[in-house]
Image (cartoon, rainbow, N blue to C red):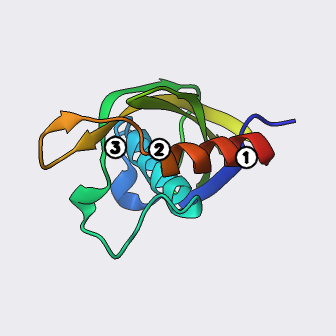
């Protein structure tokens, strides 16, 4: 049984390639970002009627371990899960694969953030409930 209950896919574009003809290392973070956004949207954490800066998170850390190169035309499956939910921050883990073959793993740490006061805040109760319910029940 997979630890990941959410997955989305990203098609590799020509602009994602480096001079060696495979996906540039920095683009993996873009793939993870897309997965994170889709995860937030699927759980109802993202309200598209509100301005972007009101999302209330900021990335504190980002890591990626590369396993295999990805090529033009590949479809990268981005699996996403919240692996730790703290008071003011939470960690998201990512598994990137092409045709069931693992190509990278990643992790980001998000901090709940009030952009008006420019300070970290507690993870909103509504977010906590939705994340815990999704990760526990799916």
Q: Nearer the viewer, mark 3 or mark 1?
A: 1
Crowd rating for badge 1 (residues with CA inside 10 Å; few <14, some 14–19, many 20+): some
129 sits left or right of 14 in the view: right
For the point 26% across and 62% down, which residue is it? 52
Please state which of residues 77 and 107 is positioned toward the viewer in this rendering: 107
Q: Nearer the viewer, mark 3 or mark 2?
A: 2
Q: Which residue is mark 1?
A: 5
Please state which of residues 41 and 112 is positioned toward the viewer in this rendering: 112
Q: Which residue is mark 2?
A: 32
Element type at marker 3? loop
Sequence-first disc among 1 and 2: 1
Q: Which residue is mark 3?
A: 18
Does residue 62 appear in the picture of this structure?
yes
65 sits left or right of 138 in the view: left
Q: Position of residue 34 (x, y in %)?
A: 45, 54
Q: Nearer the viewer, mark 1 or mark 2?
A: 1
């Amino acid at each position: 049984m997979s630890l990941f209950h959410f997955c989305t896919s990203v098609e590799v574009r020509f602009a994602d390639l480096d001079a060696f003809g495979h996906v540039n290392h920095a683009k993996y973070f873009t793939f993870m970002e897309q997965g994170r956004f889709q995860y937030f949207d699927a759980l109802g954490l993202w309200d598209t009627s509100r301005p972007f800066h009101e999302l209330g998170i900021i990335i504190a850390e980002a890591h990626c371990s590369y396993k295999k190169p990805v090529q033009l035309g590949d479809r990268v499956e981005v699996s996403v899960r919240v692996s730790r939910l703290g008071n003011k921050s939470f960690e998201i883990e990512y598994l990137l694969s092409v045709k069931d073959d693992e190509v990278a793993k990643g992790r980001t740490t998000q901090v709940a953030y009030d952009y008006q006061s420019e300070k970290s805040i507690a993870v909103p109760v509504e977010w906590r409930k939705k994340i815990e319910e999704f990760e526990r029940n799916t």
